[in-house]
Image (spheres, grey):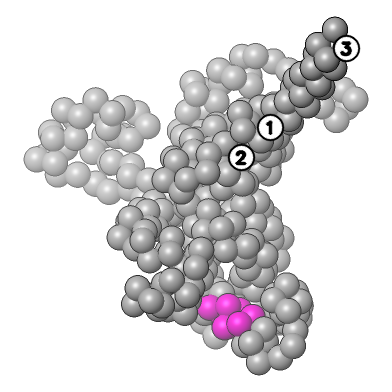
Amino acid sequence: MSEFIPAFDWTRVMVDPWTVNLPVTLWIGLMGFLITAACGLIGNYLILRRMALVGDAISHSVLPGLAIAFLFSHSLKTLPMFIGALIAGIVTTVLIELIHKKTRVKQDAAIGITFSSLFAIGVIIISIGQTDAVHLDAECVLYGEIAFVGFDLVQTDLGPGPLSVVEKIPVLNSEMFLSGNTLTIAPPAVIRMAIVTGVTLLLILVFYKELLVTSFDSGLSSSLGINATVMHYALMGMLSVIIVSAFEAVGAILVIAMLILPGATASLLVHRLPPMFGLTLVHAVFSSIGGIHLATWLNCSPAGAMVVAGSVLFVAAWVFSPSQGLLRRWFGRKLEDLTEDEAQRLSKG
């Protein structure tokens, strides 16, 4: 086992990430938190609507969008790839609804047909393109690599005035952010994900009532003048944006877990949506930090380790949930058995 699982060194695993490797750890952790938070927030609605598999479908369907965008633009720049993947995600949503509503095929089958077909098309396009020296790594799309986030930094040279202001800010006036008159802002991927997460949170706050009503009762939403179809496609559009923004770091496969795990964990602990959002953010914090330490210990993918850490949190909630945890149910049964035995003894006495 020692060949597969390294010995646990407290200093290397728990201390070094926040001292020796602080810059890299900070950006990886922040990126992991932002992705898990954005995915988890929107994932709460997927769980309420019983649409978890739609996230799976969209995450796989970005592959043909990326491949086609590359073939047309001959560039790996973010904008064309983002647009291609976003269009693919929206097309996936429309196709699922079209197949489901225009045929006798049920929604889960429509999801399977759509995402597997589009994914296969993406694989074919990449295979054909690689023969023409197209450089598009399918593994990067599928698994991502969040560990590289901190190596691509946005930097800017400051003049005397701005430099004097920055030097007065303790957080920025450090070797991590300031070197001479050059200010390191953040990796572009982190900036994009921060914007997406902020917009997601803002839209949830603005359209909270509409999303809540349409998630539970489409008939009630119609009587209140809320267009359930519009809200559905708006939600799917936002889901596509989040998945596309996240796939570069965590890939099209691990993002599925980040969509479902936070909300599923929160739903075991509380039964109202606002507390679920709060616990989703807490889950994002602890899964990101736990994933960093697990990845450092096992020398494995940080994104995969974050998902494993999130899974551990889910299992903990499943076991210790005060309302529906395994321990609660076990002790509840024991208490019921004891009560019945006591009642029988009293009746005999």
Dot 3 falls on a residue whose secondary structure is helix
Query: Callout 1: few (<14), some (14-19), or many (20+) C-alpha neighbours within 10 Å?
Result: some
Q: Which residues are magenta?
A: 90-97
- Residue reaching furthest to the left: 161
Residue type at numbered disc 1 = Gly
Query: Callout 2: few (<14), some (14-19), or many (20+) C-alpha neighbours within 10 Å?
Result: some
Camera-side residue: 167 or 124?
124
Residue type at numbered disc 2 = Leu
- Residue 132 in the image: x percent, y percent? 71, 82
Residue 313 image-quadrant placement: top right
Tell me, yes or no, whether the two marked residues, 3 and 2, touch with CB atoms within 8 Å.
no
**Disc on the earlier residue, 3 or 2:** 2
- Residue 93 in the image: x percent, y percent? 58, 78
In the image: residue 344, left or right of residue 178 = right
Q: Residue at x 64, y 80 (%)?
A: 96
Mark drawn on residue 325: 1
Figure quadrant of the C terminus: top right
Figure label count: 3
Magenta segment main secondary structure: helix
Dot 2 falls on a residue whose secondary structure is helix
Q: Residue at x 30, y 60 (%)?
A: 206
Q: Label 3: which residue?
A: 348
- Residue 233 in the image: x percent, y percent? 48, 76
Tell me, yes or no, whether the two marked residues, 1 and 2, touch with CB atoms within 8 Å.
yes
Residue type at numbered disc 3 = Lys
Tell me the mark number nearer the camera, choosing from 3 and 1: 3
Judge whether residue 254 can be spotted in this image.
Answer: yes
- Residue reaching furthest to the bottom: 102
Judge whether residue 281 can be spotted in this image.
Answer: no
Residue 112 image-quadrant placement: bottom right
For residue 227, above or below residue 140: below
Q: Label 2: which residue?
A: 268
